[in-house]
């Protein structure tokens, strides 16, 4: 428990690096032993892993808040997240974790929701609950809040951008308590962490990952809801959209999604008709390393240079990068870990890579 937490909380260890280290070394303890040497080889001096007392303090604080940890691969870990490129290794759960075994639909949308948008969110959440679905959302103002409130009698899951014990936004204090009592709050972030802007896109991949479909209700042309919709498409989920008035900026993103091929929905019946139930019974284990491929060795420095030359500020899928490099995977993957530890590249939700800003 503490070793997993120490590894994922260690500096510059993201989700992909966590699983890569676990695959290579077989356990979190062995990965922690090797990590300082790996960082040193990457040019990072005086690297220290997350201290044991910090991990133990987080565990104690989480337990005091009545939260518990869900570990990747454990029976209670949400099966819907197994097919993500970057599933969270650990989730803090506060409330009824049995809701994770039920089919779910995500409702997302504008924080400055209109009266019509709020009413639509409530109607869909309530109708989905009556049809046996759990409503997933992000506990933000506007559409999210309306969806959670309407879904409370039937089951709702709130995925938080900060720590699972952190009240955000503060006006939703009562809703936080209500969801803890009869729903479920989830977060991959450390206990007590106040959410920052960069945390919301990472949170969004979990919202879409938990759901069979993502319903967008009012979203501006550039909004977090569109990030969630893109995540959903990358994850093979359905994207369903409530249309809006062409002159309302809050619906510009929704109308763009419909123009680009997303399904238009008007009611819960439309949602139920659009959803195809996937098989979520498979519970994978951590993948084993690929056997070495026969190829001419390329110096690590040359591989690093090739990677950095191909990457830019626009995120690129890791498998596409490897194809573009035309090098064996086993030559590229260790150098990606090195560049991530050096802070030269950044991993984005959905298994994407870009140059660090």
Image: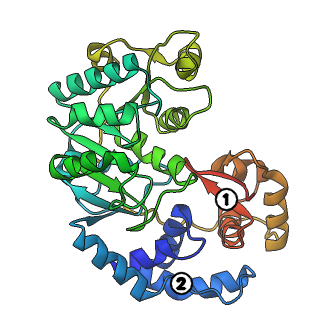
**Camera-nearest residue between 333 and 7:** 7
Q: Which colour scheme is used?
A: rainbow
Q: Are marks 2 and 1 in contact (CB under 8 Å)?
A: no
Q: In which quarter of the image is the C terminus?
A: bottom right
**Residue 346 image label:** 1
Q: How far apart are marks 2 and 1 (CA)?
A: 19 Å
| Residue 226 left/right relative to 153 | right
Q: Which residue is drawn at 56% across and 70% down?
A: 13
Q: Which residue is drawn at 15% across and 25% down?
A: 130
**Camera-nearest residue between 5 and 112:** 112
Q: Which of pointers 2 and 1 lies earlier in the amino acid sequence?
A: 2
**Camera-nearest residue between 177 and 72:** 177
**Residue 49 image label:** 2
Q: Where is residue 290 in the image (x, y as percent from the top left)?
A: 56, 64
Numbered marks: total: 2
Q: Where is residue 316 in the image (x, y as percent from the top left)?
A: 69, 46
Q: Residue at x 35, y 55 (%)?
A: 167
In the structure shown, which secondary structural element does the residue marked by tag 1 occupy? strand
Q: Where is residue 343 in the image (x, y as percent from the top left)?
A: 71, 68
């Amino acid at each position: 428990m503490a070793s997993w937490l120490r590894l994922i909380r260690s500096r510059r260890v993201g989700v992909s690096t966590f699983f890569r280290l676990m695959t290579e070394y077989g356990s979190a303890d062995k990965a922690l032993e090797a990590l300082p040497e790996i960082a040193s080889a990457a040019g990072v001096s005086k690297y220290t892993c997350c201290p044991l007392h910090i991990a133990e303090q987080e565990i104690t604080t989480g337990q005091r808040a009545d939260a518990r940890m869900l570990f990747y691969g454990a029976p209670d870990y949400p099966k819907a997240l197994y097919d993500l490129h970057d599933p969270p290794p650990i989730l803090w759960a506060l409330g009824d974790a049995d809701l994770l075994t039920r089919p779910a639909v995500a409702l997302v949308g504008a924080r400055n929701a209109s009266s019509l948008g709020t009413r639509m969110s409530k109607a869909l959440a309530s109708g989905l609950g009556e049809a046996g679905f759990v409503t997933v959302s992000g506990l933000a103002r506007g559409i999210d809040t309306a969806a959670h409130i309407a879904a409370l009698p039937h089951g709702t899951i709130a995925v938080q951008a900060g720590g699972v014990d952190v009240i955000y936004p503060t006006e939703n204090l009562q809703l936080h308590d209500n969801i803890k009592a009869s729903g479920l709050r989830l977060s991959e972030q450390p206990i007590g962490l106040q959410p920052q802007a960069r945390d919301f896109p990472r949170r969004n991949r979990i919202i879409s990952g938990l759901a069979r479909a993502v319903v967008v209700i009012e979203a501006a042309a550039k909004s977090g809801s569109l990030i969630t919709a893109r995540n959903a498409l990358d994850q093979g989920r359905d994207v369903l959209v409530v249309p809006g008035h062409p002159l309302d900026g809050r619906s510009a993103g929704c109308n763009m999604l419909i123009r680009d091929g997303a399904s238009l929905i008007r009611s819960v019946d439309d949602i139920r008709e659009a959803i195809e139930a996937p098989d979520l019974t498979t519970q994978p284990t951590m993948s084993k390393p690929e056997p070495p491929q026969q190829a001419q060795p390329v110096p690590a420095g040359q591989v690093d240079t090739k990677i950095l030359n191909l990457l830019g500020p626009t995120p690129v899928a890791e498998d596409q990068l490897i194809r573009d490099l035309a090098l064996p995977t086993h030559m590229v993957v260790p150098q990606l870990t090195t560049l991530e530890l050096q802070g030269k590249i950044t991993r984005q939700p959905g298994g994407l890579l870009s140059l660090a800003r």
